[in-house]
Image (cartoon, helix red, strand yellow):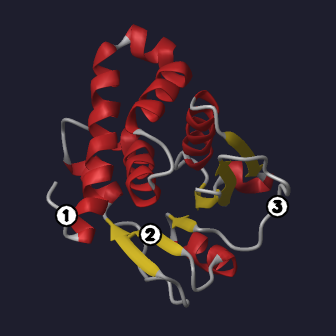
Amino acid sequence: MARTKIVLAGEGGQGVQSIAKILVEAGYEAKKQVLYIPNFGVEQRGGVSIAFCQIADETIGEPRFAKGDIVIMLSDRAIDRCQTYVDENSTIVYDSSVCSKKPECKCKKIIAVDANKIANEDSSLGARVFNIIILGVLLAATNVLELDDIKNAMELALKKKFDAKPELRTKNHKALEVGMNLVKEEAGVGA
């Protein structure tokens, strides 16, 4: 892997920035070069929130990039806003249980997942782990990091919550696996 460029986009409150922070922390702890640029603005009040991440084995020479290797779109407005970051080498992931439309652009692959629906309907998970399901999807779709790297970064980011309620650790680990399995099912690989 030379460099993986990731765009995560969703509505404010979907946890896009949390996913990005855990992802780059995991990369850092795995001794990789990482870069994270959040795009906030008024997004914190319900607009589109975007995170730009890079993970590489060598020095990242430029902080900005025009096209993502993987672009995660978690709302219709995110689809509208982020198609500009897609080209024929990009993989798009979108949540078909939230988005009423499918991304329409030239790309290498489009993966539809129903993470929000699963989070809301699976009583062993819960709506609050939606973003961790997406993190699992991202991990399986890119293979940019190891599962243990992500779990360790989650431990650092969520330690106080995990210590206060150990069942949250179990839910979050299960959510990661659910997300990873969504990509394996999409690819036709045994889960």
Q: Residue at x 68, y 52 (%)?
A: 54
For residue 189, the mark is 1
Q: Nearer the viewer, residue 123 or 54?
A: 54
For residue 64, the mark is 3
Q: Residue at x 54, y 45 (%)?
A: 15
Q: Residue 99, position in %: x, y?
A: 43, 73
Question: What type is the residue that disc 2 sits on?
Answer: Tyr
For residue 53, the mark is none
Query: Could you tell me how far apart the alpha carbons at marks 2 and 3 are, in whole angstroms?
Result: 23 Å
> Mark 2 vs mark 3: which is more N-terminal?
3
Q: Residue 78, position in %: x, y?
A: 59, 70
> Mark 3 vs mark 1: which is more N-terminal?
3
Q: Residue 188, position in %: x, y?
A: 19, 70
- Find numbered disc 3 in the image and state the secondary structure of the residue it sits on: loop
Question: What type is the residue that disc 1 sits on?
Answer: Val
- Find numbered disc 2 in the image and state the secondary structure of the residue it sits on: strand
User: Residue 9, relative to residue 23: is it above or below?
Assistant: below
Q: Is the residue under label 3 in contact with that under label 2 (CB below 8 Å)?
A: no
Q: Residue 62, position in %: x, y?
A: 85, 57
Quadrant holding the N terminus? bottom right
Q: Residues within 10 Å of mark 3 (few under 14, many from 20)?
A: some
| Residue that extends furthest to the left in the rendered view of this protein | 190
Residue where numbered disc 2 is placed = 94
Q: Is residue 174 left or right of residue 150?
A: left
Q: Which mark is nearer the camera, 2 or 3?
A: 3
Q: Which mark is nearer the camera, 3 or 1?
A: 1
Quadrant holding the C terminus? bottom left
